[in-house]
Structures are given as structure tokens and as C-alpha cells.
């Protein structure tokens, strides 16, 4: 049965799932849901995911939503190793992943940022909104990485759920011209991850915007 990912090239959440699938070497068909055109709120997509979000992964005769839930499902069913075997390690990896996916990403989601700019009526712009939150919250992640269990990657020398969340957030930081020089651990880990072909292949520039 073909694995299908309902995707969008610049969605951080979809980017995470692309990385996970690539790391597993899984073949999948990408179906672009054009968020800029509002396709996520169309009847066809809402029938698949009532939240109207991407990613959505069709796999094992299931429709899975929410990127972290999808990645943990892949970990549990494909022995991916995205979470450490020991409970303290799993808790640490989840904490870093959640710091990014739950504390940084939602407030900087484009729909939230655009609404904030609209309400501000010109007093702030998109970049202002991003810079109001992203640097400080990334600095908190940098502090979490100041830990003996940090290795080549966020937790030891194996790519984990935390790393899968970090890569898209670093992409967004660069996109919005956030200075990463005060965050040497994040920068070094991201560079190591980006050198891996399965991670590089998931990059938005390799995917490109929907045709049309």
C-alpha cells in the first residue's frame, strides 16, 4: 500500500515528517496542500483532517495527524530509534522536541503571525513578530543543550525526535534573519544534521512550492 504524505513545502510540521520518513528510507508519495491558497480549509482536506492542518500521513491503512504523534508512531512500528531506550533519555528528548514544537512553533505559525500583524494595524510587521519570540525561545533550547547527554546531536550521537524538530526551526530562524551566533550548540548540531542526505532531501528548497 502506497504511503501518502499530505505535505506543504514550508510547513515546519510537514518538514519534520519528511525528515523522519527519509531517515527510515521509506518511499512515499507527497501530495502538496497549498496553504497559501487555503487548500487546507477545502472540503477535500477537511474530510481527511478536520483540523485543516498538514501533515497527514496515510500509512498502514491509517490516517495519522500531528507531526510528533506521526513520528512516534513511526518510531514504535519501524524501530526507528527516534527516542532513546531509557526513560530519562526519552523524557529529555521529548522535552527538547516539545520546547520547539509546542513552545516556539505555535506562536510563530504564519496564521498566528499574520493575525497579530493585522490586529496591530501596521505597528508591527511579520519580522518584528518573529524576532519578538524566536531568539529568546531558541536561547532556552540552547540552554537545554548545555547538558552532558548532548553529543553530536541533541541527545548523544544518534538522530532523535529532538533533532527532527530542531532542523525546521533553524530553517525558520534563518528565513527570518534571526542571529544564531549566540547559539553555538544549536548551530553546530544543525550543521551536522543538514550534512545528512536524508535530512537535506527534506529541505523546503528541495521540495519547492506547489506547481501552478
Image (cartoon, rainbow, N blue to C red):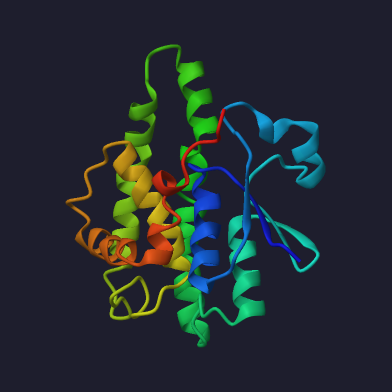
Relative horizontal placement of residue 50, taking residue 113 as reference (left or right):
right
Between 22 and 77, the one nearer to me in the picture: 22
Q: Position of residue 43 (x, y in %)?
A: 80, 33
Between 191 and 123, the one nearer to me in the picture: 191
**Vertical placement of 48 versus 75: above or below?**
above
Between 59 and 93, the one nearer to me in the picture: 59
Quadrant holding the C terminus: top right
Q: Position of residue 127 (x, y in %)?
A: 34, 29
Q: Position of residue 128 (x, y in %)?
A: 33, 27
- Residue drawn at the location 41% of the way across and 62% of the way down: 199
Q: Residue furthest bottom?
A: 86
- Residue drawn at the location 38% of the way across and 43% of the way down: 172
**Vertical placement of 102 versus 159: above or below?**
above
Q: In this orientation, does residue 96 appear? A: no
**Vertical placement of 186 versus 138: above or below?**
below
Relative horizontal placement of residue 142, taking residue 89 as reference (left or right):
left
**Vertical placement of 38 versus 67: above or below?**
above
Relative horizontal placement of residue 67, taking residue 181 as reference (left or right):
right
- Residue drawn at the location 34% of the way across and 51% of the way down: 170
Amino acid at each position: 500500500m502506497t504511503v501518502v504524505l499530505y505535505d506543504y513545502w514550508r510547513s515546519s510540521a510537514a518538514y519534520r515528517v519528511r525528515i523522519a520518513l527519509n531517515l527510515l528510507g521509506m518511499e512515499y508519495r507527497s501530495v502538496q496542500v497549498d496553504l497559501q491558497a487555503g487548500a487546507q480549509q477545502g472540503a477535500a482536506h477537511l474530510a481527511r483532517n478536520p483540523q485543516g492542518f498538514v501533515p497527514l500521513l496515510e500509512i498502514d491503512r491509517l490516517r495519522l495527524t500531528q507531526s510528533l504523534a506521526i513520528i512516534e508512531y513511526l518510531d514504535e512500528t519501524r524501530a526507528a530509534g527516534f527516542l532513546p531506550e531509557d526513560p530519562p533519555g526519552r523524557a529529555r528528548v521529548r522535552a527538547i522536541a516539545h520546547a520547539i514544537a509546542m513552545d516556539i512553533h505555535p506562536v510563530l505559525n504564519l496564521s498566528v503571525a499574520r493575525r497579530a500583524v493585522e490586529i496591530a494595524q501596521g505597528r508591527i510587521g511579520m519580522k518584528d513578530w518573529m524576532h519578538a519570540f524566536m531568539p529568546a525561545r531558541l536561547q532556552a533550547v540552547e540552554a537545554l543543550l548545555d547538558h552532558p547527554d548532548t553529543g553530536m546531536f541533541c541527545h548523544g550521537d544518534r538522530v532523535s525526535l529532538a533533532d527532527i524538530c530542531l532542523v525546521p526551526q533553524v530553517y525558520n530562524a534563518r528565513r527570518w534573519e534571526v542571529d544564531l551566533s549566540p547559539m553555538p550548540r544549536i548551530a553546530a548540531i544543525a550543521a551536522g544534521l543538514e550534512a545528512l542526505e536524508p535530512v537535506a532531501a527534506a529541505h523546503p528548497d528541495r521540495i519547492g512550492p506547489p506547481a501552478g
